Every structure is written in structure tokens, then in C-alpha cells.
């Protein structure tokens, strides 16, 4: 599981950092930044979910693979008999 922080929505409350400091860190501007390696993400999945659920502004979201956003379903129009 990987997450991203939309800093435009972050109010710098620090909840995510206190729940999982291995992944979230409040930067110099007072906004949450995602830190940590792939291994950290795998090792702290539960805390990451807690942080995601605890964020008061919904600034944290799961980082969806790009392919999922760009693939559109193919609709075949074949109504002729
Ligand atoms: S919990 Fe949400 S609003 Fe609070 S610092 Fe983290 S990302 Fe920002």
C-alpha cells in the first residue's frame, strides 16, 4: 500500500505523523510529506490506514497505479443482427 498527501488539503494537524512517523513527516512549511521506502510502506500498512482514516481533511489517499486511471473500458456497439 502506498499513499500520497494532497498538501492543498493538509492543515498540518500532525495526526498522521504521530500515528506513523516512519511514513509521514511535517515539513518546514508545516505540511505533511510522505517519506519512507517501499519496505516502510509494506511494514507499516496498518498504521498508514489508521493515518488515512484519521486525517480530518481527507488529505491522505491511496496512491493508485497510473494505469488504473488511464485505462478505459472498451464498449463494443454491435446491435445489428
Ligand atoms: S492528518 Fe491530514 S491534515 Fe493532519 S497533518 Fe496529516 S495529512 Fe495533514
Image: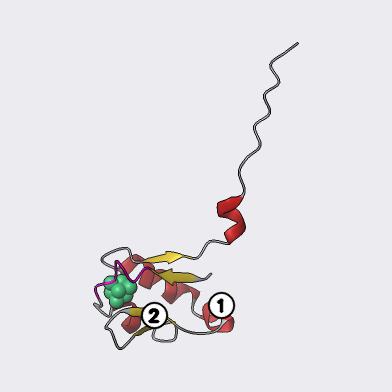
Residue 76 in the image: state x and y as whole percent.
Answer: 68, 28
Residue 46 versus residue 20 in the image, above or below: above
Q: Is residue 24 left or right of residue 66?
A: left
Residue 68 versus residue 73 in the image, above or below: below
- Magenta stretch: helix, strand or loop mostly: loop
Asked if the residue at label 1 sits under 8 Å from ligand 1, the reply is no
* Residue at the image point whose x is 24% and y is 77% from the top: 13
Residue 46 versus residue 27 in the image, above or below: above
* Residue at the image point whose x is 38% and y is 71% from the top: 50
Marks counted in the figure total 2
Task: Identify which residue, 42 or 67, lies in the foreground.
Answer: 67
Residue 62 in the image: state x and y as whole percent.
Answer: 47, 64
Residue 21 in the image: state x and y as whole percent.
Answer: 39, 86
Task: Identify which residue, 50 or 78, lies in the foreground.
Answer: 78
Using a 10 Å C-alpha cutoff, classify the residue at mark 1 as few (fewer than 14 neighbours), some (14 to 19) or many (20 or more).
few
| Quadrant that contains the C terminus | top right
In magenta segment, residue 44: no
Task: Identify which residue, 8 or 21, lies in the foreground.
Answer: 8
Q: Which residue is mark 2?
A: 33
Report ligand 1 position as a quadrant.
bottom left
In magenta segment, residue 9: yes
Residue 49 in the image: state x and y as whole percent.
Answer: 42, 69
Task: Identify which residue, 45 or 65, lies in the foreground.
Answer: 65
Tell me if label 1 and label 2 are in contact, CB under 8 Å.
no
Q: Secondary structure at mark 2?
A: strand
Q: Secondary structure at mark 1?
A: helix
Q: Which residue is mark 1?
A: 42
**Foreground mark, 1 or 2?**
2
Asked if the residue at label 2 sits under 8 Å from ligand 1, the reply is no
Q: Earlier in the sequence, mark 1 or mark 2?
A: 2
Which residues fall within the magenta stretch?
A: 6-11
* Residue at the image point whose x is 69% and y is 16% from the top: 79
Amino acid at each position: 500500500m502506498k499513499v500520497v498527501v494532497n498538501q492543498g488539503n493538509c492543515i498540518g494537524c500532525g495526526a498522521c505523523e504521530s500515528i506513523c512517523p516512519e511514513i509521514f513527516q511535517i515539513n518546514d512549511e508545516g505540511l505533511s510529506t510522505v517519506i519512507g521506502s517501499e519496505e516502510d510502506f509494506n511494514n507499516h500498512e496498518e498504521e498508514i490506514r489508521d493515518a488515512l482514516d484519521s486525517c480530518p481533511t481527507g488529505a491522505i489517499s491511496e496512491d493508485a497505479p497510473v494505469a488504473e486511471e488511464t485505462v478505459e473500458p472498451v464498449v463494443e456497439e454491435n446491435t445489428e443482427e
